[in-house]
Structures are given as C-alpha cells and as structure tokens.
C-alpha cells in the first residue's frame, strides 16, 4: 500500500456511507454527542479529507459533520446527476438531518462557499430544516468577478471540458493544486497523490467536467446568492489566507463589505488551502470566532 493509499484508507475508516435521496454519500462525524454541531462543506477539486488534520482541535469542542459532495472523494459519482450547486445543497442539508442535526454552525471552503450561499438563500425563504447559528467562509470565490480561477478550471467548465478531463494526468493536477498554495511544500506529495486518487476513482474523470460548470452557476445565481449575503443576519466570519492566488484578497474584502457585521480575519502567509497549509492556525481562527457564541 502506498502512503497515499494508506492516507485514504485511514480517512475512510473514520467515516461511513449514508444513503441520501438514493445516492451514496461518504460522511464523517466526530466529537462529543452533547457538543454543539458544526457542519462543514469542502472545496473543489478535493474532498472532506482536507480537514483531517483540523478535526482533533475542532472535535474537542464540537460535534463536527463532514461529507464528500457527490462526484468527489469517496462519495458516489453518478452519471445521471446534474452536479448543480443547488442539488449539492439539498444533499448536504439532508445528510445533516439524517445525522440528527437540528441547529449548527456552518463552515465552508471554496466550492463549499457557493453551496453555503444557496443554503442561506433557502433560509431566507424558510426552506431550511436546520437552524444555522453562524457562518464561517474561508477562501472561496463566491464573488467570481473579484476572483481569478485557474485557466484549467475554465477549460474544464467549457465545451472541451469532457475531453480535457479524460486526457489530463496527475502532473497537470499536481501543478495546478500546488500553485494555489502559499508554499508548494506545505502539501506533502502523498497528500497530493491521495487527492488525485480520490478525484479520479470510481469513474471520477467523467464527473470532473460537469462539476466544473459550477463556475457558470456563480454568475447565473449571483443575485440570489450575493443578495442572501447582503441580508444575512447571522454572526459571520471571513477567515482568509491572504496569499491565495484564486480567491484573492479582494474577494475577502468584498464579502466583509457586503455582509452586515462580518468579522474578517487574515491568515497571513497562507494560500487557498489554509486548513492544509497550517491546520493549527486555521483551527484556532475558527474556534476563536465561535468561542463567544458557545460559552
């Protein structure tokens, strides 16, 4: 077994599969049963394993719920699925309900921030079965006009996306993933390799292009999602690596301007994956914000 395979096996052993609307979702729940709930949404093109190193700190104080979105990681990668952020939001919420969550703090990274804003839009309309207590957004390009997605993302989201997804190899993936970090050495080679395996296993290549079209939804539903942020009445934390070349500083500043009363915390010297680049500092940032909300 390679180090990457061992990393995946260890993570898989910590979770379980859940049937959600007839689809298989890989989930992880850790922390005391009587602790406040914290629900987490991961980013693109990785999976919930991004948070593995942060779980000891987070689960010491919270009952933490993670899952791999459909098409990602250890979850099912169905051919007959839209991969719309709207459907991903439905599966996320239902997975929490099935795990007994009634109210929770919401934490989202990258792609997960768009899933989160869809949930916030539903909350405005009274369509959310889970009561949200706070929101933490970390390094996501919700304000796409201020972000700078990698060229490969636009290619995969376009006409030739399916072909490129079949032809692109580990070298392309590795180069693009490392380019989003403040220091490429902050993600070990076996972790990069594990992310590639998780992305492509179980027919994952066929899902890459449909998933990548979420970039177009960020434009299509901008008024719905950014509107929900402008009217948000929950404690909100913008926790941001300031050396992110994708979800740049301007995105964090734009979110802080648009969300009433939002707290902006900079993680100096960190890039697009701050929870991987410095798990301890990122976790401390999350917990410091939540502490006054759960005395």
Image (spheres, grey):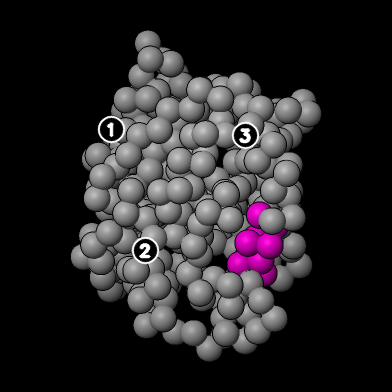
- Nearer-N-terminus badge (3/2): 2
Between 215 and 242, which is closer to the camera in this rendering? 242
Looking at the image, is mark 1 or mark 3 earlier in the sequence? 3
Is 224 left or right of 290, judged from the image as shown? right
Is residue 88 positioned above or below 74 on the image? above
Give the secondary structure at mark 3: helix
Q: Which mark is residue 229?
A: 3
Q: Which residues fall within the magenta stretch?
A: 210-218
Residue 180 - label? 2
* Magenta span includes 258: no
Spot occupied by residue 167 in the image (x, y as percentages of width and height)? 53, 88
Residue pictured at 45% horizontal, 43% vertical: 252
Q: Nearer the viewer, mark 1 or mark 2?
A: 2
Image point 73% across, 28% down: which residue? 124
Residue receiving disc 1: 284
Q: Which one is closest to the eye, mark 1 or mark 3?
A: 3
Q: CA–CA distance between discs 3 and 2?
A: 26 Å
Quadrant where the C terminus is found in the figure: top left
Q: What secondary structure is the stretch in magenta mostly built from?
A: helix
Extreme left residue here? 185
Could you say which disc has been placed on residue 129 in the image? Answer: none
Are there few (<14), some (14-19), or many (20+) residues within 10 Å of tag 1?
some
> In screen coordinates, is 195 left or right of 42?
left
Rendering quarter of residue 96: top right
Q: Based on the picture, tell me whether residue 217 belongs to the magenta stretch.
A: yes
Q: Position of residue 28 (x, y in %)?
A: 46, 44
**Marker count (numbered):** 3
Q: Earlier in the sequence, mark 1 or mark 2?
A: 2
Report if residue 34 is visible in the image.
Answer: yes
Callout 1: helix, strand or loop? Answer: helix
- Residue 117 in percent (x, y) is at 63, 40
Q: Quadrant of residue 163?
A: bottom right
């Amino acid at each position: 077994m390679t180090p990457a395979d061992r990393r995946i096996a260890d993570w898989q052993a910590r979770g379980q599969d859940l049937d959600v609307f007839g689809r298989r979702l890989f989930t992880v729940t850790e922390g005391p049963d009587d602790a406040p709930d914290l629900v987490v949404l991961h980013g693109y093109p990785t999976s919930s394993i991004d948070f593995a190193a942060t779980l000891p700190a987070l689960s010491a104080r919270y009952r933490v719920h993670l899952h791999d979105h459909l098409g990602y990681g250890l979850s099912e990668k169905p051919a007959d699925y839209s991969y719309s952020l709207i459907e991903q939001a439905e599966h996320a919420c239902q997975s929490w309900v099935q795990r007994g969550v009634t109210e929770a703090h919401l934490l989202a990274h990258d792609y997960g921030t768009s899933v989160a804003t869809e949930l916030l839009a539903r909350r405005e309309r009274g369509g959310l079965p889970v009561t949200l207590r706070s929101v933490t957004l970390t390094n996501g390009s919700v304000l796409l006009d201020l972000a700078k997605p990698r060229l490969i993302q636009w290619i995969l989201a376009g006409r030739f996306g399916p072909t490129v997804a079949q032809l692109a190899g580990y070298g392309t993936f590795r180069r693009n993933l490392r380019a989003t970090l403040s220091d490429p050495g902050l993600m070990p080679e076996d972790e990069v390799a594990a992310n590639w395996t998780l992305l492509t296993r179980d027919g994952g290549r066929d899902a890459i292009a449909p998933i990548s079209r979420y970039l177009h939804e960020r434009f299509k539903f901008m008024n719905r999602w950014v509107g929900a942020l402008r009217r948000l009445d929950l404690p909100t934390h913008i926790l941001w690596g300031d050396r992110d070349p994708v979800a740049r500083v301007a995105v964090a500043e734009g979110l802080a301007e648009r969300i009433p009363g939002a707290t902006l915390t900079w993680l100096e010297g960190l890039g697009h994956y701050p929870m991987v680049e410095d798990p301890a500092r990122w976790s401390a940032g999350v917990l410091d914000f939540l502490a006054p909300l759960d005395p």
